[in-house]
Amino acid sequence: MIVAVTRAELAAALHDAPAGPKRAFVPTMGALHEGHASLIRQARLAVGLDGCVVVSIFVNPRQFGPNEDLSRYPRPIENDLALLADLGVDVVWTPTVNDMYPPDEPLHEVHADERGSILEGASRPGHFDGVLTVVNLLFDLIRPGIAVFGEKDFQQLVLIRSLAAARGDVQIVAGPLVRDTDGLALSSRNAYLTPESRAQALVIPELIGMGQDLARAGAPADLVAQTVEVGLLAAPGVEPDYVVVTDDDLGAPKAPGHARILIAARVGGVRLLDNAALDLQGEL
Ligand code: AMP
């Protein structure tokens, strides 16, 4: 496994590496867990043993707001590199902020469409512009034919699909959300939870399961969302930010059909995201 830090080291590592559909890329912010590992396995499956799997670790300041957790975001780089080596990754890029954004180089900023201003974007203004700008730059520097993103960040995935469609040079593969054995969605930010908050947070996947059951039994989308929100409001230590049901493109859900329930909630001061597929039945 080659670990590159500077842009020149990255370019050298990729110079003779398989490219196009034989090069898959998984961007991360590190503090890796089984959710990231599942995406890396999908990347390997997509390119084959003779392909090239590239992973980046970069805590992107442009996607953090002024009052967010940029400086305290976990950075266990040695553990991360050991895990990536075990997973058989070919190239890891761990740039500094100056490697990613050289001060003397003009930056092509990407702006999210209106779907970047709702949900996460409403709570975190500018967040998705920061995400799309760094992902676009990463695509320019790494030139993957395939890039793998997790459904854990569902709104991000939808916006990145549009970025990739506009670029026309990279295929986006989605990895299912990976949960811990107790049902909590895996996240690097779970490290901030106290044992008490973590136990309180389990109501989120429990209520998602209930929402899925309700949808299957014929409840309309707004009733599913309301019921889950009421459950979260009643749960000790949990402050929901939003509970919505959308279609797979963040638009209004259609019944019968596939939909998505998306949740953000604060538990013990930690903002947690979760989402899951719903099957809306329509008129019964
Ligand atoms: P992050 O390091 O949080 O920026 O995440 C890097 C990638 O891993 C993104 O595509 C995330 O959606 C994905 N990811 C994070 N947590 C999970 C999870 N629990 N299951 C699946 N993918 C995940």
Image: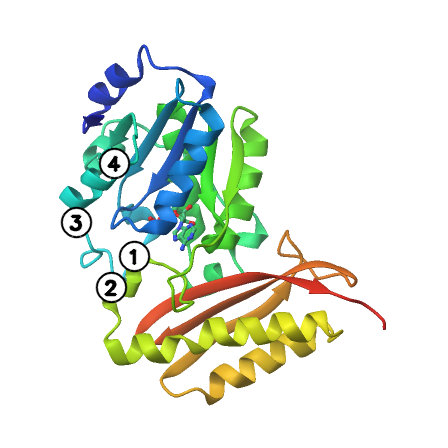
Around disc 2, counting alpha carbons within 10 Å, would you say few (fewer than 14), some (14 to 19), or many (20 or more)?
A: some
Q: Nearer the viewer, residue 132 or 229?
A: 229
Establish if 205 lies above or below 27. below
Q: Looking at the image, is mark 1 or mark 4 nearer the viewer?
A: 4
Label 3: few (<14), some or many (≥20) within 10 Å? few
Q: The N terminus lies in which quarter of the figure?
A: top left
Q: Using the numbered discs, state the Cα–Cα distance from disc 1 to disc 3 in whole angstroms.
A: 11 Å
> Which secondary structure lies at badge 3?
loop
Q: Upstream in the sequence, badge 1 or badge 4?
A: 4
Residues at badges 3 and 2 in contact (C-beta under 8 Å)?
no
Of the image marks 3 and 2, the number of the one nearer the N terminus: 3
Q: Which residue is mark 4?
A: 86
Quarter of the figure with residue 89: top left
Which of the 4 image quadrants contains residue 6? top left
Pick out the residue farthest to the top: 16
Badge 1 is on which residue?
188
**Dot 4: within a 10 Å radius of its alpha carbon, few (fewer than 14), some, or many (20 or more) residues?**
few
**Disc 2 marks which residue?**
191
Q: Residue 76 got which mark?
A: 3
Residue 227, placed above or below residue 29: below
User: Which amino acid type is marked by label 4?
Assistant: Asp
| Residue 272 percent coordinates (x, y) | 39, 67
